[in-house]
Amino acid sequence: MSRKFLALLMLVFGCVLGIGPRSGDAQSFDRTPDLRTPPVSEGTPAAGKRVKQVHPEYSGSNVYHLLYLPTDWKPGQAYPVIVEYAGNKYRTSPGTVEGSNLGYGITGGKGVIWVCMPYVNKTEMRNQETWWGDVDATVDYCRDIVASICGDYGGDANNVFIAGFSRGAIACNFIGLHDDQIASLWRGFFCHSHYDGVKQWPYPVSDRASATERLRRLGDRPQFISHENSVDATRGYLMDVMPDGNFTFQRLSEWGHTDTWVLYDVPERKALREWFHAQLQSGQ
């Protein structure tokens, strides 16, 4: 029995039973990833490990971030940094720092420090799984941790990128361009699936006028913007409000609402990696 026939049989049974890939949400069922996001391990940070860390202000709470040092990490050397924000808790996303994949897919675990940042729920002192929690606390947490990563682990302050999926894609501007101080951190942006200002969401200042004000802090820095099915809505918005912006658009034609596509050897990931390396080279 061929693999294709088995895959088709599994899909049919999955549809009958209400399980398996959902249209528009999961990746193509017959693909095999060439990367697997590393699990969270205990202990101190080390090359090739993804570990839990806590901002000193939140010691003893359930607010934390994850730090991954690349397999080629050595003390005393400098490394670009990718700061990543997760999507909302949803059927294709757990809404957690542990469930993030973009930074690992972009780098393959080499040459770049990867940090998965929380949205801070300061009332309950935990990571927020849906929307923002306390925006100011989230911004402050990110700014402080980027500084500590650069100071303690060799993060290159001139090559810090922000990335996110879904809610996290909106966060690239909503959090990353929240004020002048945090906006100054970033070398480039990677926003996958959604974009701040394209539509209004059920939280304050999600309107287009507010998003456009945040976008002014971007300047001429580059953004790689991707979306399943079509990027036309985001492209149209940006052509209206920042027609001379440094934007690269990438449509994903065979993927649903997921960030796991970066774990597969597909043309879209190749394009993203080429963009990322081009930004690093242009900054040298």
Image: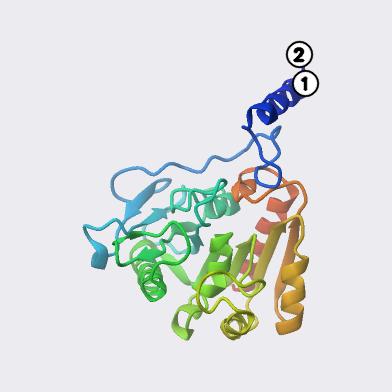
Q: Do the residues under discs 2 and 1 have CB atoms within 8 angstroms?
A: yes
The answer to whether any part of residue 243 appears in the image is: no
Extreme residue toward the top, this view: 1
Above or below for 86 versus 204? above
In this orientation, which residue lies closer to the viewer: 155 or 103?
A: 103
Question: What is the image's colouring?
Answer: rainbow
Above or below for 270 versus 142? above
Q: Where is residue 105 shown, x and y percent of the image?
A: 58, 50
The alpha-carbon separation of the residues under discs 2 and 1 comes to: 7 Å
The residue indicated by pointer 2 is 1
Q: Where is residue 63 shown, x and y percent of the image?
A: 32, 59
In the rendered view, does 256 fall on the left or right side of 92? right
Which quarter of the picture shows residue 232?
Answer: bottom right
The residue indicated by pointer 1 is 5
If the image is split into quadrants, where does the C terminus sit? Answer: bottom right
Please name the amino acid that badge 2 sits on: Met
Residue pictured at 37% horizontal, 65% vertical: 120
The answer to whether any part of residue 107 appears in the image is: yes
Query: SS for tag 1?
Result: helix
In the rendered view, does 262 fall on the left or right side of 50? right
Q: Where is residue 144 shown, x and y percent of the image?
A: 35, 72
Extreme residue toward the left, this view: 60
Residue pictured at 63% horizontal, 27% vertical: 17
Query: SS for tag 2?
Result: loop
In the rendered view, does 98 fall on the left or right side of 270? left
**Residue 44 badge:** none
Q: Residues within 10 Å of mark 1 (few under 14, many from 20)?
A: few
In this orientation, which residue lies closer to the viewer: 189 or 153?
A: 189
